[in-house]
Image (tube, helix red, strand yellow):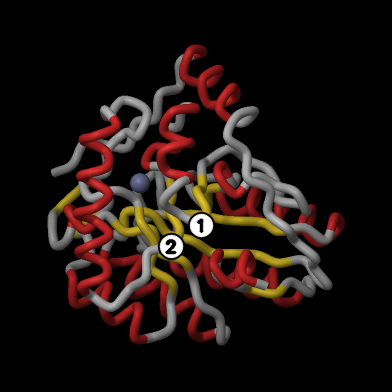
Amino acid sequence: MIQPYTPDVSLKGKLRRRLARLTHRRPARLDLDRPVVSFTFDDIPASAAHAGAQALEKHGARGTFYVCAGLFGRDGHMGRFANAAEISALIHQGHEVAGHTLDHVDCHRTAPAALEADLDANDLALRGLGAAPLHFAYPYGEVSPRAKKQLGARYASLRGVHKALVHDGGDRNQLPGVGIEGPDGEALTRAWIDRAVAERAWLILYTHDVRETPSPWGCTPDALDRLIDHARTAGCDIRTVGEVLAA
Ligand SMILES: [Zn+2]
């Protein structure tokens, strides 16, 4: 079992993450003809690698999967985690595989040398499966100015968990993320998709397990399917993080 998903919700933690947003910024150049939504998955429970990926494929779309290779095949509070073969299958299906540390470590609390070793090991494992891990999501959304600087030197983008849309000039080193999670997850996400349409912006969504009875950090396959359908019907492109930033 890995530690349950417990971000630091203290005032100090919130202030640190907010302060980090002001430092080590790297502007993303976006010139969007249409609103765009990225569906992303963190940690990668096996259910996300199967039901999550299939929901996107059914709509001709692909997702971004932020993978911790240290969790391969282990059991956790979000169900069994995907193994190497299941992540390899995602790559084969055209999904984007990105980094999330080897052992789901808190990037703020981990010393720089230990963090670098962890990232090296995770990237090596993912490259061994045929992935090019160019992008990264902060485990627990935990970030500090120091971690942001260190990770920004390694990856083309870094995603957090603060709720916002991305416009031209948005910070690649601390991209926002809106969670499809919890009892109100679907309704809140629908509203964020509508905002992205109104502002012709980029919305990055994330979730964890995709199951009939999801954990508090996941969603059901039907909810995910309805959200993909809503994004498409509302006129959004659905692209991976790497596709949006490379365009
Ligand atoms: Zn995570």
Total numbered badges shown on the rendered structure: 2
Give the image quarter of residue 237. Answer: bottom right
Image marks 2 and 1: residues in contact by CB distance under 8 Å: yes
Give the image quarter of residue 22. Answer: top right
Query: Which amino acid, mark 2?
Result: Leu
Residue at image point 43% right, 83% down = 94
- Graded by Cα atoms within 10 Å as few (under 14), some (14 to 19) or many (20 or more), the crowding at tag 2 reads some
Residue at image point 28% right, 82% down = 89
Residues 196 and 167: in front is 167
What percent of the width, then of the height, locates residue 8? Answer: 40, 23
Residue at image point 46% right, 66% down = 64
- Identify the residue under disc 1: 156
Marker disc for residue 134 = 2
Compared to 143, does 247 lie above or below? below
Q: Is residue 8 left or right of residue 87?
A: right
What percent of the width, then of the height, locates residue 126? Answer: 26, 66
Which label's residue is closer to the chain start, 2 or 1? Answer: 2
What percent of the width, then of the height, locates residue 241? Answer: 55, 64
Compared to 140, does 108 lie above or below? above
Compared to 155, does 2 lie above or below? above
**What is the secondary structure assignment of the residue under circle 1?**
loop
Q: Is residue 6 left or right of residue 231?
A: left
Q: Is mark 2 within 8 Å of ligand 1?
A: no
Q: Farthest top residue?
A: 12
Residues 218 and 27: in front is 27
Residues 189 and 201: in front is 201
Q: Is mark 1 within 8 Å of ligand 1?
A: no
Marker disc for residue 217 = none
* Residue 220 in sight from this viewpoint: yes
What percent of the width, then of the height, locates residue 15? Answer: 55, 17
Query: Which amino acid, mark 1?
Result: Ala
- Graded by Cα atoms within 10 Å as few (under 14), some (14 to 19) or many (20 or more), the crowding at tag 1 reads some
